[in-house]
Structure formats: structure tokens, C-alpha cells
Image: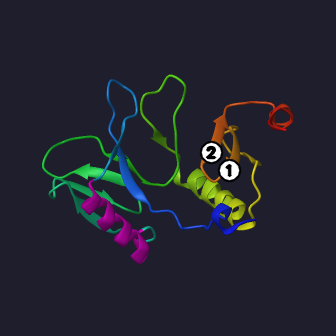
Amino acid sequence: TDVGSLCFYEPVQYHWFYNQQERGRDSWQPFSRKDSSRLEEAHELGGGDVDVVVATEGRRYDVRLAERLRYAVYWEQEPSEVRRCSWFHKGNKEMMYTPHTEAISNLLEEAYMVSVTLSEWRRHLVLPTGENVILHNPKTCLLGASFNYNLYLTQMK
């Protein structure tokens, strides 16, 4: 293989999102870069294990890292879910990408790291949700509720 076709694994850059319900549907919104960096720093310092509170959005909301919840400070509002995000998916009829859960993102990232490091592609995973994932190459990942993996392999030859 020539050096130009080699890929090197770089650890993922996480960004934090919160779930804002709109018309009864999930709408995942990113925190600002500043807030996301502060959340990530607190997480790296052990904030996932102890009850660390990070003020966000000009101190209008507090995020309790251990709970993964965002609370309004000055008014009554239902707490919203918070996620440390690295992998996203989008359904056929969806307009926006939705972050995978942190557990699924960790599985995907580990499989991606192995594929990049060993240069072994067309890796097939079945997620705990039952969805199938194929890491086709460094830039392409297929996700589907159900598809015939053997048929996919036959068509790719």
C-alpha cells in the first residue's frame, strides 16, 4: 500500500448536545463550543462519576453531569437529557441527525478504531438496538434496521 492510502486513527472530538422537545419530538441541539468544552473538561476530570454541576448558556441552565440532565435555573421547566456525542444517525424521513447514545457511540468508535488501525473494512456490527452497521471504509458507514449482510457482501464484489 502506498502511504497516501493509509489511514491513521485520531481519537474522536466530542461535542455535547441536549434534547429539546419540539411538538412531542426529539430535537437534539448542540451546546455552544464554549459550553461543550467546559462540559468535556469537567467530564474528563471525573465529572461522570460524581455530582458535578456545570453552568451553561450564560448560567441560565445547569448541567448535572452524573445525571446527564440539563436544568433551568430561573424558571420551571422539565429537565432535558444531555449527551456526550460522537456518532450520529438519520432516518430516511428525518431532516436532522440524532446522536447515538453514549454506549452505542463507544461501540461504534471502538469498531472504527480497530478498522482504521488494522485497515480491515466492511466490518459488520449488530447494535444492541438490533440495527446493523457496516463500516465500509474510513468515510462511509451504513446503518440499517435490517438488511441481508451476505447479500450486501455479494453485491460489493
Tell me where residue 103 appears, x and y as whole percent. Answer: 58, 55
Q: Residue furthest bottom?
A: 45
Q: Is residue 87 left or right of residue 17?
A: right
Give residue 16's position: percent from left, percent from top. 38, 55
Q: Are marks 2 and 1 in contact (CB under 8 Å)?
A: yes
What secondary structure is the magenta-colored segment mainly?
Answer: helix
Position of the C terminus by quadrant: top right
Q: Is residue 68 visible?
A: no
> Which label is found at residue 32?
none
Q: Residue at x 60, y 58 (%)?
A: 109
Q: Identify residue type, mark 1.
A: Asn
Disc 2 element = strand
- Where residue 90 sits in the image (x, y, percent)? 51, 34
Helix or strand or loop: what does disc 1 sit on? strand
For the rendered model, the colour scheme is rainbow
The residue pinned by badge 2 equals 140
Please name the residue shown 51% across and 63% down the image: 12
Is residue 126 found inside the magenta-colored segment of the image? Answer: no
Nearest the viewer among 157 and 123 is 157
Q: Crowdedness of circle 2 by 10 Å Cα count: few (<14), some, many (20+)? A: few
| Residue 137 circle label | 1
Residue 33 figure quarter: bottom left
Residue drawn at x 39%, y 57% as measured from the top left: 15
Count neighbours of disc 1 (C-alpha within 10 A) and say few if under 14, some if 14 to 19, many if 20 or more.
some
Q: Which residues are magenta?
A: 32-47
**Residue 80 quadrant:** top left
Residue 142 lies in quadrant: top right
Residue 44, position in %: x, y?
A: 42, 73
Frontmost residue, 4 versus 145: 4
Quarter of the N terminus within the rendering: bottom right
Q: Give me the residue at 85% from left, 31% from top.
A: 151
